[in-house]
Each structure stands twice: as structure tokens, then as C-alpha cells.
Image: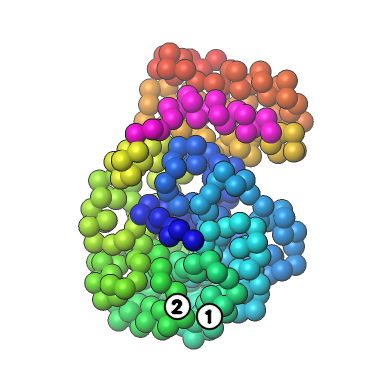
Amino acid sequence: MSRLNRTVSVAPMMDCTDKHERFFLRLISKNVLLYTEMIVSEAIDRGDKKKLLEFDMREKPVALQLGGSSPKLLANASKTGENFGYDEINLNLGCPSKKVQKNKFGACLIKEPNLVADCLSEMVNATSLPVTVKTRIGYDNVDHYENLYNFVNILKRTGVKTFIIHARKAMLGKFTPKQNLNIPPLKYDYVYKLKRDFSDLEIIINGGVTSVSEVENHLEKVDGVMIGRSVYHSPYLLAEIENQIFNNFDVLSRQDIIEKLIVYVKQEIKKGTRLNQIMRHTLGLFHGQNGSSYWKRYLSENMCVRDADISKIDHIMDKVKPNSQNISAGQID
Ligand SMILES: Cc1cc2nc3c(=O)[nH]c(=O)nc-3n(C[C@H](O)[C@H](O)[C@H](O)COP(=O)(O)O)c2cc1C
């Protein structure tokens, strides 16, 4: 099995990194690793596995992110994920929401390293895929580097070799999820030190990265960079990353991406997917370009058509299909 390239990855984001977003991002970037939204192991156990886990093989490589704290259910979910064709299984130890805490998964598990180690051991035994961890640098007042060091030291004994570190602590019960993504300060030094102290581990840094030059700076100190919101809001950042990080200059233009996406949209509409379930992810495609607000407005006004049939889709997509002229003139319609 070839080793996964984690030099740059797109972060798991609930309500964002679903299969349609991943298909769209893969049209822009061949090389980044994509993550699913967090899927709870109990849901996989009891729910419709196909609905939760099925994806288009053209999205690969894709890592499945799991939430949970039952070693048995997480092990079963890891095996199921492998059978569905995922490339990595990741355990979420960073989500601070109250609901998640109530169900005992996410960032509150940083308090229970031995339970997490049990979960990871079972997961590693259940699958031949790499099992990885995504966590924060600490929680509440437990935010000294030594705590992070000890946590990783316990978890590495399970055989897990890749740690994705969101360089902020989680304030459990105090902040909303949104505040928890913005208020606790970023402490990149913790992550750099972790790499120095555990040179045998693959350490991926996450949090607040917005540009290729920041990616390049981090890569001098750690093994990989994970980006979330900047890619969601400005997906064509991945084209720059392809050029400058992966030396890949064979990247589609924004127009060509939309052309290819239309083919996918048509396939998906036939399966019952709604137009806005796909196109909402493309709102930021023209971010920073002249006329980008027209693209956003046109999509917002037209992508929510109900009971869209293919002929309607053709009509709408013909109108939104951008070309350099109408985008720069700000005239999509
Ligand atoms: C809308 C949204 C949903 C998120 N959902 C998840 C999730 O399901 N699992 C997870 O580990 N992190 C989740 N996160 C956190 C991101 O993966 C990432 O750690 C965080 O946004 C910091 O990276 P960034 O500054 O590059 O966005 C989410 C973040 C956002 C903005």
C-alpha cells in the first residue's frame, strides 16, 4: 500500500466537507488529502451505512473521520470504513461542542488518555488502514506543553504514527463552537516542539492557515499542514497549492472546473440530489476575482429550485457557467 501524502490536507468540517464538496475540491487538486465530516461510530453501527459512508472513488484519497469513545464501536466503524474504500481512519479528539461532550467524544476525551488509547488500539487491530488522531493542544486550564507531550506519549504506544494538532486549546463548556475556533490563541510553537520531541511521528499542524507562504513556513518545521476554513471560503487556493507546493501546473481553470462539475451535477440530480447540495460549496470559487459577488448572488438566487429536472438544470447551469468576460464585467446573467 502506498504511503498517503499528508503534506497538505483539507480539514474535516461538519456541513461542509461532504461528498459533493470533496468531489468539487478534487477537481481543483490532485494531491491534497481530503477528510470527511465527523461521523459518529454509533450512527454507523445503527444507521444506514451506505447513506453515511458511500462516496465517489474519484474523490480519493479520502480519510474517514470518526467520533466516539467506545473501543468496540470505533473498531467496527474503522473496519466498515475500510470496506467502503477510505484511505485512512481518523479519530476526532478536538470537537468542543456541548452536545459532543455530552456523548463523550471530541475534545473532552483529552481528559481520558487511557480510554483514548484503548479506542485507538482496537481501531489499529481492526483495520489495515493508517489510524490517525486529530486533537487540540489542551483544554481549559490544562494547557501546558507537558500535558500535550504526555497525551501524545501515551497514544503513540498504540501504534498511531500521525497526529494532527489544531494549535488551539478547547474551552469546554465555556465557548460556543465558533468561539472555540477563534478565541483561544494559536500556539504553533507547541506543535513545532512536538515534532522536535517526537521526530519519529508524523506531525500535521492545523489552525489559522490562509496562504501558500504560511504553508511553506510550517513545512520547514512539521510534516504537513491541514487547512479548513480558508479552503472552504476560497477553494481555488488549492490551485496555488498544487502549483507551489506540489509543482503541479496541470490545474484546471475555474471555468473548466464548473464545466466538469456540471457533468457531475447532472448525474447526481438523476439520483435525487438537489442542485444546492452541490453548488453551495462553489460559492467561493471566484473569491478575490472581479465579479465574484455576481457569481455568489446568481447562485444564491437560483440554486434552490425545487424539483429541478434536467432541462431546468441545463438552463440554470448555462446561465451560471462563468466565462472570463461575464465574470470580469460582473454580468453573470
Ligand atoms: C464549520 C466547521 C465544522 C467543523 N467540523 C469539524 C469536524 O467535523 N471534525 C473536526 O475534527 N473538526 C471540525 N472543525 C474544525 C476544523 O477541522 C479545523 O480544525 C478548524 O477549523 C481550524 O482550522 P482552520 O483555521 O484552517 O479552519 C470544523 C470547523 C468548522 C469551521
Q: CA distance from mark 1 to mark 2?
A: 8 Å
Q: Main secondary structure of the magenta part?
A: helix
x 60%, y 68%: residue: 78
Where does residue 89 sit, x and y in percent of width and height? 54, 65
**In the rendered image, which residue does mark 1 sit on?**
121
Q: Looking at the picture, does residue 315 appear above or below residue 65?
A: above
| x and y percentages locating residue 149 in the rendered image | 33, 79
Q: Amino acid at mark 1?
A: Ser
**Residue 59, horizontal then vertical, whole percent:** 55, 46
Q: Closest to the observer: 86 or 173?
A: 86
* Membership of 140 in magenta stretch: no
| Contact (Cβ within 8 Å) of mark 1 with mark 2 | yes
**Most distant residue in the bottom direction:** 114
In the rendered structure, find residue 25 and report the number of the disc placed on it: none
Q: Earlier in the sequence, mark 1 or mark 2?
A: 1
> Up-down: is 53 above or below 249?
below
Tell me: 234 left or right of 196. right
Vertical placement of residue 111 versus 231, above or below: below
Where is mark 2, residue-wise?
A: 159
Q: Secondary structure at mark 2?
A: loop
Which residues are the magenta region? Answer: 249-267
Q: Amino acid at mark 2?
A: Gly
Whether residue 213 is situated above or below residue 138 in the rendered picture: above
Q: Answer whether residue 304 is visible to the viewer in this image.
A: no
Q: Residue at left 53%, top 53%?
A: 62
